[in-house]
Image (cartoon, rainbow, N blue to C red):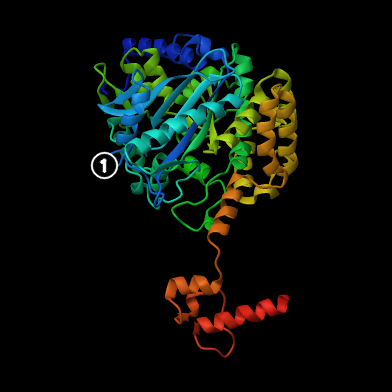
Amino acid sequence: MAKHHRNRTDEQRKRLTDNRQTMLEAISCQHDCKDPSTQSAGMTVILERFAVRGTDKAVVPYEGSPGMAQILGQLALTYPDGQIFSDGHLLGVQGRLGIDGLPGPIAVRATLGAGGQVVLAIGPIREIAHVLDVVQVFDRQFHLACKAIGVECELVSQGCHPSTRLASDAPIVPTARNALVNTYLARMGPSALDYLRCTAATVLRLPVADDEATATRRYQLCAAFAPIMAFLTDNSLRLHGCDPHETPRMARARLAHAADAQRCGLVPGSLGDGFGFEAYERWVEGIRPIVFASQDGVTFSTGADTCKRVMEERELTQGEALHLLGMAWPDVRWNGFLELACADSLQPRLACGYAALVKGLVASARSQERAGALIGLDSLDDDAILDAWDQLATRGWDARVYGKPAGSLVEGLALIARDGLENPGERRLLDELAELWEVRIVPRDTLVANWDRMHPHTTRQEAAELYGEGAIIPYDELDGEPPAGQTAVIDLRQIQEALAQSDAQQN
């Protein structure tokens, strides 16, 4: 950005005032920033998934053979008029898919995240159950594109990539924007790069209410829901390639909050009396946008400049205002939609169950009122939300959230959501996900259970894998202390005898 004196000129002050109005129009979608018809057409469901090789489940990089560029090139044959490019690179496709039972086709957009995540946006769509139909069609198209070029690749729904140990295991997709964001976040530490390149989410976009009071109430309700939703959709098997049992609860959410405290997590004052469009816009002004584009379309770094500084420099278009809004990454955001980004990537059916939960809670004024009363929204503040994150991340189902046991609170929210859904198909989707919560598990628990079934091991087998049959194992490599009078080493025969003795005692 051009440098100027600390004191703003009259021209800069006027430009800032005008751009603030443009930003407010973009936040509330009061202008032509989006197609107005989409605002009443329902929810958009965005599924982020990892493309992994069928052999070792490693990242499929953008470049190389095989690579995501080749897969997208083949997939683009199905969408000849909907190819999406950036810096000369094919980054995605978009179009409309006709689904039986719907009066018109559904908008579909598939792009690549910074680490090669396949980001599939479906909608806006009124009936959540039809999202599954669209995913099935797209996944078939993706599979055929891979098959046509001889690539063995699958799409994996997990919050953290199951096989990467470092962010560098997920090569950055080669665009100027990705490179600049990657460079900026590298200064924030490894968690920021892991979040950018090795995580995937389920994102929901809802229409912004016509009046600001209703929109604000819905935003605040979703901000209070965010830690609960992150807990209920926890779906990360492994973090940094470690043992699943050592992966912390809500791993993706932890990375998201550690990435950049300035732009992630909870917007300060979200539950305050003065919160609304203007307060949110002022918060965004303090965010560093990282990247921007010159008037001739060249992407460049904004360095330490904030959004406010950018807004002083030139008159913004609606698209540029949306770009600035898009560089703020709180769990709940306003960017022409009300967007919830607190959930892990989920298998499509579970993702639809989650979408049905949110729809049932906020679709009607009655549901919002009941849900707000259940969590005591009017008495909550920022500290209460931060405490809910901490409680759920550390204590899980034993947590107390907003003064209530986590289990009973979740059951109450699920009941309110179910009552708020009129479509039987959406109720069934919610019920399938809620069945997990009824037995006090979340999607991640099923991943770990499946892992254990596929990787059974005993102490002896584990020791044999590490040291070889007949090895002499130092006690300091094992859990516990050596038996009294024994030397500081133990062999596999002793382990076998101890296990056999333990089995005999149990029988």
Residue position marked by numbered label 1 in the rendering = 64
Query: Which of these two is toward me, 23 or 54?
Result: 54
Other residues around mark 1 within 10 Å, as few (<14) / some (14–19) / many (≥20): few
Quarter of the image where the C terminus is located: bottom right
Residue found at x 61% / y 81%: 498
Q: Amino acid at mark 1?
A: Gly
Query: Which of these two is toward me, 343 or 104?
Result: 104
Asked whether the viewer can see residue 46, the reply is no
| Placement of 246 over or under 346, stated as above or below | below
Quarter where residue 432 is shown: top right
| Placement of 202 over or under 468, stated as above or below | above
Residue 362 locus on image (x, y percent): 66, 23
Quarter of the image where the N terminus is located: top left
Q: Is 466 on the left-hand or right-hand side of 457? A: left
Residue 234 locus on image (x, y percent): 57, 43
Quarter where residue 322 is shown: top left
Q: Is 174 on the left-hand or right-hand side of 440? A: left
